[in-house]
Structures are given as C-alpha cells and as structure tokens.
Image: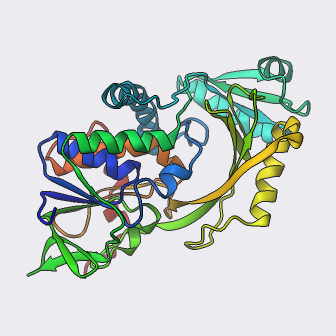
C-alpha cells in the first residue's frame, strides 16, 4: 500500500465512488480514511435524491443534480448485483408542502419555472395531498409532487460502494489520519500519514468538510463545516409513504421502519454535538408536517457536518499542484451527487472526458490572483 498510482483521501461516498472507478480503469488505488469508512456526512444524511427541491433556474448545479439522480437509477442495480445487498432505493417520488402563505408563494414560483423548463412537477391541492398522505397536518394548504425524486439508504450505499471498490482492486486504509500532502522537489509525491509517507503521483481530495485542511495545498478549497442535526422515530407501521418536505425541513420514511426528521443548518465549526436547540428545531419541523408523531418514540439523534462553500457549488477538478484533484464541497447534495462526481473526477484522473461539463465547479474559481 506504500506505493500506488492514486491516493484518495476520504472514504465517504465521493472517495469510494472515485476509487471504484479508478480501480475499474486499471489504477492501483489506495483510499485513506482518518476514522472508519463512511463515518461522516455520507452516513449521517437522510438519503434524499431530490435535485428539484432547492434548485435555482439558472444554477449550473441543476443539470449536474438531474444527471446524478439518473445515475443512482443506473448504479444501484449494478451495486446490488455485485454485492447482494438491497440499498433501499424507493421510486415513490416526494411531496413539497406549504403551511403558510409565504410557503405557498415560494412553491408556486418553483412550479412555474420548472414547468416552463419541462421538468416533471405537479401541483396538488390540500385535499389531494391529504388523500395521498392522511397523516399529514390538516394545516397543509398546497403542495408539489416530484415524481422523479427518489430516496436511498445512504449507509447501505456506502457499504456497497466500499465492497465493490475493494472487489475491483482498491485498498482501503482506515483509522489513518492524513496530515498533509507530501511534496519533493516541487512535485506531489503522495500524502503524509503520521510519521509515514504514502507514495502516489496523484492525490484526490475527497475529505468532505475537512477538504480545506489538507496541509501543503497552495490553494485549499474554501470548504467549511455546516452542522445538520437529525432525529429518527421508531414507528410501525410508518405513518408516511413518501418523502415530505417543507421549507423548514423534511421527513423521510425508511424501509427498516424508521422515520428520519431533519435538519438544522448551523455554522458550529467541527462540533458534531446534538444540542437541545437543534432537537427542538427538528421536532418542531416534524410535528408541523405530521402531528401524529407527537406520541411516537424517538429512536436516535445525531449530527453530521456538511461541506459548505461560499457560492453553494462543489469543487470538482484539478487543484493547484499537478496531480492534485478535488472532489468536495457538495453541501446539502452529498448523497445525491456523491457517486456521480466521484466517478467524474476519477475520469479526469484517467484522462477521460466527464459526462457533464465541470467548468462551473473548477477549484480555481476562488484561487488568489497571481502576481
């Protein structure tokens, strides 16, 4: 493992997808992870595959997100066939619901531009929404149905990608924090992990919220952690069949009987604490959507750190040093985008043209001006 063709730093969805693609392309790949595989945001998320939910009409993120949703439909059966695992991919679609006049105005605006763009979206009256989901609050006044949206069990997706990457020849070194890049004579030669240097001429930074902390990078990506707190309810039978989202949060039913509720969005540094204020916010969101949850047992509560960026767009592509590539900054779309962007950055490493133009996501867009 001391000499590889490519070192991928980070064993979340992005890093594992990149390693799988690189190994399939014949590269000797080492994935280095500071704790355990999928320990951070990749396992903490709710598994929503919803590119239209927060999309802006002119954002370059929308075409990438739509392609990423389609990619999950292609990738999931392949991974299930390779690993024998069921990843809990649901094709039910999702509802966006309004409880206030302001909520409704925002949803009607989204409806108008997405219909004009030819995207699959339908408006629903309060009666139609309650007919589809009887346990929703009677205060619901309007909604949208997004038939193309999906949900997946992201923790199982992590396990499947890891198993597939290893089966294709990638090696995973867990519990080994990377302290920085290894540079010799001005060239990238690998990474430093403790007192050891792991050698490779190419390094992929897939470190999520920690991506800006890779020492030795002249232009580190402007990524900061954004804490999201979630709660799970243990409910059987589940009171909802679809993902239900409001402008303040969401409820996501899982095949294992849990119902996930989230989420906060907090600049709290690298603190993953579950707080009283965070839990109050998430519970308020959950009860606003489905008051029936008031009598249900809370099963668990946790927090993850999303990798935020100044403009809300990821960093995908070559870094400041020859051989350094970034695949990070996915913010609220990590589960949706992770597998696709990991593969696309791997394609860049292999000298292939990615399936989507990545120009708008270049890591150089925030690089300091050269003098």
In the image, residue 70 lies at what x, y percent?
A: 42, 28
Q: Quadrant of the N terminus?
A: bottom left
Task: Identify the image quadrant of residue 257.
Answer: top right
Depth check: give the residue in front, 41 or 366: 41
Q: Residue at x 79, y 65 (%)?
A: 276
- In the displayed structure, 192 sits above or below 221; it is below
Task: Identify the image quadrant of residue 30.
Answer: bottom left
- In the displayed structure, 124 sits above or below 162; it is above
Q: Is residue 100 visible?
A: no
Q: How many marks?
A: 0
Residue 125 falls left or right of residue 305: right
Q: Residue furthest left?
A: 185
Residue 39 falls left or right of residue 144: left
In the image, residue 315 lies at what x, y percent?
A: 37, 57
Depth check: give the residue in front, 74 or 110: 74
Task: Identify the image quadrant of residue 240.
Answer: top right
In the image, residue 174 lies at what x, y percent?
A: 34, 61
Q: Residue at x 56, y 43 (%)?
A: 56
Q: Residue at x 18, y 39 (%)?
A: 24
Depth check: give the residue in front, 353 or 227: 227
Q: Quadrant of the C terminus?
A: bottom left
Q: Is residue 265 visible?
A: yes
Q: How is the image coloured?
A: rainbow
Q: Residue at x 57, y 35 (%)?
A: 52
Residue 116 falls left or right of residue 359: right
- In the displayed structure, 117 sits above or below 103; it is above
């Amino acid at each position: 493992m001391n000499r590889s063709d490519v070192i991928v730093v980070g064993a979340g969805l992005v890093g594992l997808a990149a390693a799988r693609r690189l190994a399939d392309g014949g590269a000797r790949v080492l994935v280095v992870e500071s704790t355990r595989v999928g320990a951070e945001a990749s396992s903490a998320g709710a598994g929503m595959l919803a590119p239209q939910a927060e999309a802006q009409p002119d954002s370059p993120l929308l075409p990438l997100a739509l392609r990423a949703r389609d990619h999950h439909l292609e990738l999931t059966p392949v991974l299930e066939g390779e690993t024998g695992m069921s990843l809990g991919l649901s094709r039910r679609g999702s509802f966006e619901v309004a409880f206030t006049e302001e909520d409704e105005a925002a949803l009607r605006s989204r409806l108008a531009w997405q219909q004009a763009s030819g995207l699959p979206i339908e408006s629903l009256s309060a009666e139609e929404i309650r007919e589809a989901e009887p346990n929703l609050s009677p205060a619901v006044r309007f909604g949208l149905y997004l038939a193309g949206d999906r949900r997946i069990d992201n923790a199982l997706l992590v396990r499947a990608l890891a198993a597939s990457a290893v089966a294709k020849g990638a090696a995973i070194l867990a519990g080994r924090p990377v302290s920085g890049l290894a540079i010799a004579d001005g060239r990238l030669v690998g990474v430093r992990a403790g007192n050891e240097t792991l050698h490779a001429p190419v390094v992929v930074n897939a470190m999520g919220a920690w991506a800006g902390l890779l020492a030795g990078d002249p232009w580190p990506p402007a990524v900061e952690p954004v804490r999201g707190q979630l709660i799970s309810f243990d409910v059987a039978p589940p009171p909802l069949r679809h993902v239900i989202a409001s402008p303040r949060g969401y409820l996501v039913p899982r095949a294992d009987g849990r119902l996930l509720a989230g989420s906060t969005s907090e600049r709290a540094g690298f603190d993953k604490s579950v707080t009283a204020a965070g839990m109050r916010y998430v519970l308020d969101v959950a009860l606003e959507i489905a008051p029936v949850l008031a009598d249900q047992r809370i099963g668990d509560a946790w927090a993850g750190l999303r990798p935020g960026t100044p403009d809300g767009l990821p960093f995908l592509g070559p870094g400041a040093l020859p051989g350094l590539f970034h695949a990070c900054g996915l913010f609220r779309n990590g589960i949706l985008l992770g597998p696709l962007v990991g593969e696309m950055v791997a394609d860049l490493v292999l000298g292939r043209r990615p399936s989507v133009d990545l120009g708008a996501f270049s890591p150089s867009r925030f690089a300091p001006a050269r003098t």
